[in-house]
């Protein structure tokens, strides 16, 4: 059965998925880069963005899992880029260069319509203005039986969580404090929504937890 999955989403000890004041210079907000100390050194990450040499072990195993059996992605508009409000033009095509690491259809939730953007490597960004259910329906249809990964950020995950639509969430908790920013779980009653922790594993850089309905 195809799932809606959050995977390799990192929060700080105080529960934030990004720091405050996201900008072009600081995509993850102030201090947010410190979240990914577990992910950046992994072989999986380095094969995508670095020299190909990286660590194996607990952190890399979760990174590998996060890319398995994916047929489509859903992102919030803030994860796609730093532009807010109306699109000034069609120049911004995401943070990830000509060949983004998705290689599927990617459905970007926004209130501001825009034509789809076809990238190298079979990634196409579609901009969905009809809300979370429409994005999920389109992503599932595109995924053809494979899983849909909900990439983030926190505001988008929170909506799918509150609607009880996420089947599985892997969250990495990094030992850093951000103080403020985009909270993932605050005000959401995960227990009432039917989630339970089915896996928890530690590495020196993060505590990994998997929640499932
Ligand atoms: N910690 C991690 O592992 C991780 C992973 C991914 C991303 N991030 C970071 O998270 C940050 C982004 O997260 P975020 O919580 O600020 O925002 P987000 O969830 O990426 O995007 C929120 C925006 O998406 C649009 N949107 C969301 N739901 C919508 C709906 N139902 N209908 C229409 N539009 C909708 C709205 O934009 P408009 O109204 O402007 O169109 C909204 O302001 C970035 O800093 C990113 O780098 C962190």
Image (spheres, helix red, strand yellow):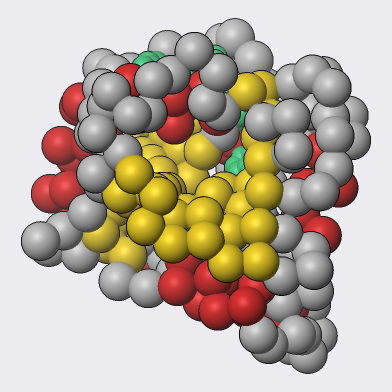
Viewport quadrant of the N terminus: bottom left
Q: Residue at x 74, y 30 (%)?
A: 14
Asked which quadrant contains residue 90, the reply is top right
Q: Indicate the position of residue 97 as horizontal and vertical percent values.
A: 67, 57
Residue 168 or residue 194, whichever sits in front: 194
Q: Is residue 94 left or right of residue 194?
A: right
Q: Nearer the viewer, residue 137 or 37?
A: 37
Image coords of residue 17 (percent x, y): 66, 34
x, y (%) of residue 68?
37, 73
Judge whether residue 181 can be spotted in this image.
yes
Query: Quarter containing ligand 1?
Result: top right
Point 37% across, 57% down: residue: 198
- Picture layout, residue 89 above or below residue 24: above
Left or right position of 19 against 151: right
* Closest to the observer, 45 or 209: 209
Does 199 sit above or below residue 106? below
Where's residue 154, x and y in %? 55, 29
Instruction: Say above or below: 24 vs 72.
Output: above
Quadrant assignment, res 52: bottom right
Compared with residue 69, is residue 134 higher up or lower down, i.e. above or below? above
Residue at 20% x, 27% y is 134
Tally of marks: 0
Q: Is residue 46 left or right of residue 75?
A: right
Which residue is located at x 63 percent, y 23 percent? 183
- Quadrant of the drawing holding the C terminus: top left
Asked whether the viewer can see residue 113, the reply is no
């Amino acid at each position: 059965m195809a799932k809606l999955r959050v995977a390799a989403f990192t929060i700080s000890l105080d529960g934030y998925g990004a720091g405050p004041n996201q900008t072009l210079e600081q995509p993850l907000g102030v201090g947010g880069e410190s979240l990914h100390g577990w992910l950046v050194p992994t072989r999986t990450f380095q094969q995508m963005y670095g020299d190909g040499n990286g660590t194996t072990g607990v952190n890399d195993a979760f990174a590998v899992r996060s890319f398995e059996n994916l047929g489509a992605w859903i992102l919030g508009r803030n994860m796609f880029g730093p532009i807010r409000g109306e699109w000034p033009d069609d120049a911004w095509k995401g943070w990830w260069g000509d060949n983004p690491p998705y290689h599927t259809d990617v459905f970007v939730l926004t209130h501001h319509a825009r034509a789809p953007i076809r990238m190298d490597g079979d990634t196409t960004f579609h901009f969905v203005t009809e809300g979370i259910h429409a994005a999920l329906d389109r992503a599932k249809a595109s995924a053809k039986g494979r899983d849909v990964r909900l990439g983030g950020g926190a505001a988008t995950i929170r909506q799918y969580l509150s609607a009880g639509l996420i089947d599985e969430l892997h969250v990495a908790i990094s030992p850093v404090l951000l103080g403020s920013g985009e909270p993932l779980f605050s005000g959401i009653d995960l227990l009432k929504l039917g989630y339970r922790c089915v896996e928890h594993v530690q590495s020196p850089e993060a505590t990994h937890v998997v929640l499932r309905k």
